[in-house]
């Protein structure tokens, strides 16, 4: 009888061990599924964050370009002035010529404008003039800081054109033109 009891006790222990092994296996399977879902969730979250960061970068780039364009329009070095008052949206062509000479000759000014307009090319084009062209057909390159950016790192080019009045004080005529800003990001 003692042998039967020992046999039954061993059988019960084996069943209990099998149930325990099944429970451990189920727990491991549940943990594996949990971690797989957690990893998939993290990957999904990371992709969403990358997309949101790209949108923020695009918004920042657009704001930066608009700020640079407005800075060009309102540079006191170029604005027209009549009796000590500045005119709105007007560029003095005589000041433009002087600006080009001074910036072209002075490295300090080149660095200043390179910091003010990073990775940008600013061109002033004349569209209409009642007495002929005061600027060349290709326009006058005001600032060209594109050389500072490595050509392999140029991601995108954004071009913004703003209308402006061009005043020629020598001939005393106004003409219509555009400030074209090409900015690399």
Image (cartoon, rainbow, N blue to C red):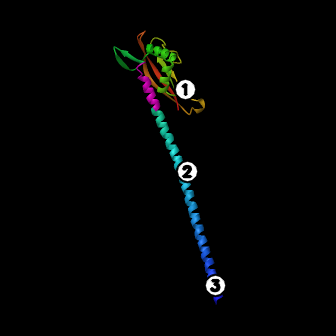
Where, by quadrant of the figure, is residue 66 drawn?
top left
Q: In this view, does 29 lie to the left or right of 162?
A: right
- Between 8 and 68, which is closer to the camera in this rendering? 8
Pick out the residue farthest to the bottom. 1
Residue at 48 percent of width and 15 percent of height: 102
**Which dot marks residue 6?**
3
- Give the foreground label among 2 and 3: 3
Gap between marks 1 and 3 measured at Cα: 90 Å
Q: Give the range drawn in magenta.
A: 64-77
Question: Magenta stretch: dominant SS?
Answer: helix
Residue at 43 percent of width and 25 percent of height: 71
**Which dot marks residue 146?**
1
Badge 1 or badge 2: first in the primary sequence: 2
Gap between marks 2 and 3 measured at Cα: 55 Å
Badge 2 or badge 3: first in the primary sequence: 3
Secondary structure type for disc 1: helix
């Amino acid at each position: 009888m003692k042998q039967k009891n020992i046999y039954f006790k061993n059988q019960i222990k084996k069943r209990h061990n099998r149930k325990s092994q099944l429970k451990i296996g189920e727990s491991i399977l549940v943990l594996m599924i949990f971690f797989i879902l957690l990893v998939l969730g993290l990957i999904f979250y990371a992709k969403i964050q990358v997309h949101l960061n790209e949108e923020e970068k695009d918004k920042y780039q657009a704001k930066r370009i608009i700020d640079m364009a407005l800075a060009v329009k309102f540079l006191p070095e170029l604005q027209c002035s009549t009796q000590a008052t500045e005119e709105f949206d007007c560029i003095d062509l005589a000041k433009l010529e002087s600006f080009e000479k001074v910036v072209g000759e002075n490295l300090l000014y080149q660095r200043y404008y390179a910091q003010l307009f990073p990775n940008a090319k600013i061109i002033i084009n004349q569209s209409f003039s009642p007495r002929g062209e005061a600027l060349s057909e290709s326009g006058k390159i005001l600032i060209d800081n594109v050389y500072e950016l490595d050509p392999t790192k140029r991601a995108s080019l954004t071009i913004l054109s703003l209308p402006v009045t061009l005043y020629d004080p020598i001939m005393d005529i106004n003409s219509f033109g555009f400030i074209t800003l090409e900015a690399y990001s």
